Structures are given as structure tokens and as C-alpha cells.
Image: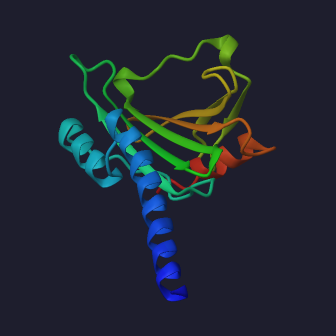
Amino acid sequence: MKNHLLLFSSIFLAASVYANEDKFDRNFSKLGYKEVDEALAESKQHFKKEIVLPNEIPITFTHSFARFSNPEGDWNDKLEVRYVDEKSGDNDYKVEVRHIDYKLLIREEMIDKELKLNNGIRAIYSTTMFEKRNNLVFEMNEWQYILSLDEDVSDKPSEVLIKVANSID
């Protein structure tokens, strides 16, 4: 009897965990997110150029998703990659990449400070560009990168984001 109860409990717990993970995945899927490699391939096909993502990921995460947005015209075409932790709402990191011809323009009042990457590239750090986010914006290899980290993830977010930016090969 104990073995049957243990087996039933194990199956029930596994099914519950799987159902929760599946629901979490479905919520992102409804927003157009898919596997990172799939969205990278779509962006490469569209832009005719490969996007290189940072090697460094500044948070622990349970899921990674991506979507390539290609609305009418070229202005808002972008690749967006999200790393999230299902168990911690604070662990949310996003990489957004746009072609430099269609980059977002950052107003002067949104710039907290200007920084430099190891390769000398100028980066803009902003805490007001997106609500409750720390953002690092820079241009590299004909792309504009926006690295965005939840404000509660780190007590030194600009240093963390610079380290991530420096990990792009």
C-alpha cells in the first residue's frame, strides 16, 4: 500500500510540475516567443547577417525564449531574447537587437551615464528608458544592442551589464 501511495504521489507531483512549466511556456508562446535558435535563424534570414549574442548571462534562469519581430516596414524589426526564472519574478534579463539603420534614439534626459566597453565602444546606461529596468545600449557590428536587467537583480547593474556586453565575440 505504501508503495502505491508513494508511486501515486510521485506521479501527481511530476504532473503538477510539468503542468506548471507547460503553462509558463505557453504564456510566452502566446506572445510570439519560441526557441532562441529558431528566432536567431529567422533574424539571420531576414537581415542576411548573423546576430551574435553575449556569451555571459547575468542571472540564473529556468527558461530562455526569443522572438523575431518583423512588422510591416523595417523600422521595428528586431530580435528579442528573454531569460527568465519561473520561480523568481526578479530574474528577468532581455537582449534586444536591431539593425543600426533602425536603432532606437535615446533622448539625452534618459542617459544616466556614458560608459566604454573593453573594445572602446561607447555605451549608454539608463534606468529611465524602460520602467523598473537597468539598460545598457551600444552599437557593434552594424547592430544596436539593448541589454536590459530587472532593477532588483543586482546592486551594481551597470557593472554587470558592461561585463555582459564585453562577452560578445
Q: Nearer the viewer, residue 155 or 120?
A: 155
Q: Is 143 displayed left or right of 146 in the figure?
A: left
Q: Is 159 displayed left or right of 38 in the figure?
A: right
- Where is residue 96? Give x, y as percent: 45, 36
Q: Is 99 displayed left or right of 148 in the figure?
A: left
Q: Nearer the viewer, residue 41 or 51?
A: 41
In the figure, 8 relative to 51: above or below? below
Q: Name the residue: 31% across, 18% down.
A: 75
- Where is residue 20? Give x, y as percent: 47, 52
In the figure, 122 relative to 17: above or below? above
Q: Name the residue: 47% across, 44% down.
A: 82
Q: Nearer the viewer, residue 126 or 83?
A: 83
- Where is residue 134? Give x, y as percent: 67, 33
Q: Name the residue: 71% across, 45% down.
A: 153
In the figure, 157 relative to 87: above or below? above
Q: Name the residue: 32% across, 51% down.
A: 35
Q: Nearer the viewer, residue 146 or 65?
A: 65
Q: How many numbered badges does the structure rendering display?
A: 0
Q: Is 62 displayed left or right of 109 in the figure?
A: left
Name the colouring of the figure: rainbow
In the current view of this chain or complex, which residue is farthest to the right?
155
- Where is residue 11? Give x, y as percent: 44, 72
